Amino acid sequence: MWEAIHADPSIPLAKPVVRMIIDDQRRISRRWLYPYARFFSRILVTALSLIKRIAPGRWMSLTTMDRLCLWFLRRFVAPDAVELLIRHFVVETNLVNFIIRNTATTMEPVTLRPTTLAGLGENAVVEHDINVYDVLISLEKVRVDAPDQIDFSQLDVPTLDPERRQRRIMRLDIQTALCFMNVPFCIALSLEEFRRAIHSLRFDDSFLEILAVITEDETFKHWKMGGLSLWMDTNVDVPHLVYRHALVCEYAHAHLASIARRNGVDPG
């Protein structure tokens, strides 16, 4: 099965990235711990959300949340999984900036491109979600069309440091790790912030549609899942959607890089 997935020619990602994702999914924690972590995470987050309706607000500072998550990633999550997480922030920023550079929006390119595990601190998660909203808001009165000349700059992914030499107690896969980290996110964010973060995942289809228009390439639409942004429903399996969101971003980013190369541009 895994050999077929690795060989699948429809996957646009570079083979080293495909191998990293496959190896992460083959971890023992993904098979034996993830099903239970997924269940208990959703139950606990649902309970916390209900309680927060009665006692709203932050129950933990964002700084404490960042420190807790960084400690968890350093001690309990496999380096490859950490690298995939850092990589996602860079990849999504590249997609956001591609849209900014190829539309008439006046929004400045965003700068969230961490290269180290420590770079995931300093409210990176919150900033990451806000960037999605900001770019869509900036397009409100902008006509999105294919530009005469597409700007393929800054599609590179720099060398990332997931602190491989750090001694770890466990080496969890990224999906199991997301289940655990979803709990402090729920605790630290206000109910409205948590809902906003979850709803940002519904904009994947919007981004894919915009990318398809800019590049005049329908391939991006193949990865849409019908997540209508008008449909506000945050009673969802957050870690599951976050993982799918990360994969969609990887697919879109890899395809953009492929288009750039076909146009004689080195994406880096």
Image (cartoon, helix red, strand yellow):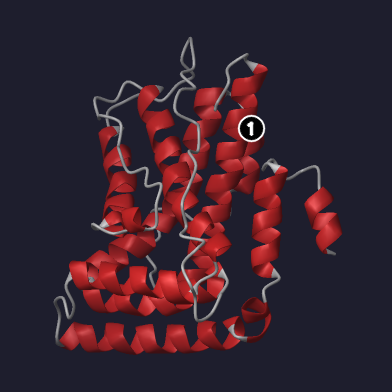
Please determine whether, in this image, residue 205 is positioned above or below residue 36: above
Q: Quadrant of the N terminus?
A: bottom right
Q: Nearer the viewer, residue 226 or 50?
A: 50
Please determine whether, in this image, residue 120 is positioned above or below residue 171: above
Q: Residue at 19% across / 67% down in the picture?
A: 63
Q: Residues within 10 Å of mark 1 (few under 14, many from 20)?
A: few
Residue 210's spot in the image, x, y percent?
Answer: 47, 34
Q: Give the side of residue 158 with respect to residue 22, left or right.
A: left
Q: Nearer the viewer, residue 176 or 241?
A: 176
Q: Quadrant of the C terminus?
A: top right
Quadrant in which residue 252 is drawn: top right
Residue 106's spot in the image, x, y percent?
Answer: 24, 25
Badge 1 is on which residue? 218
**Callout 1 secondary element:** helix
Q: Nearer the viewer, residue 192 or 175?
A: 175
Going by the numbered disc 1, the residue's amino acid type is Glu
Q: Residue at 60% across / 84% down in the picture?
A: 35
Can the viewer see residue 104 in this picture? Answer: yes
Residue 80's spot in the image, x, y percent?
Answer: 57, 60
Quadrant in which residue 26 is drawn: bottom right
Please determine whether, in this image, residue 20 is positioned above or below residue 151: below
Can the viewer see residue 236 in this picture? Answer: no
Q: Residue at 44% across / 56% down in the picture?
A: 202
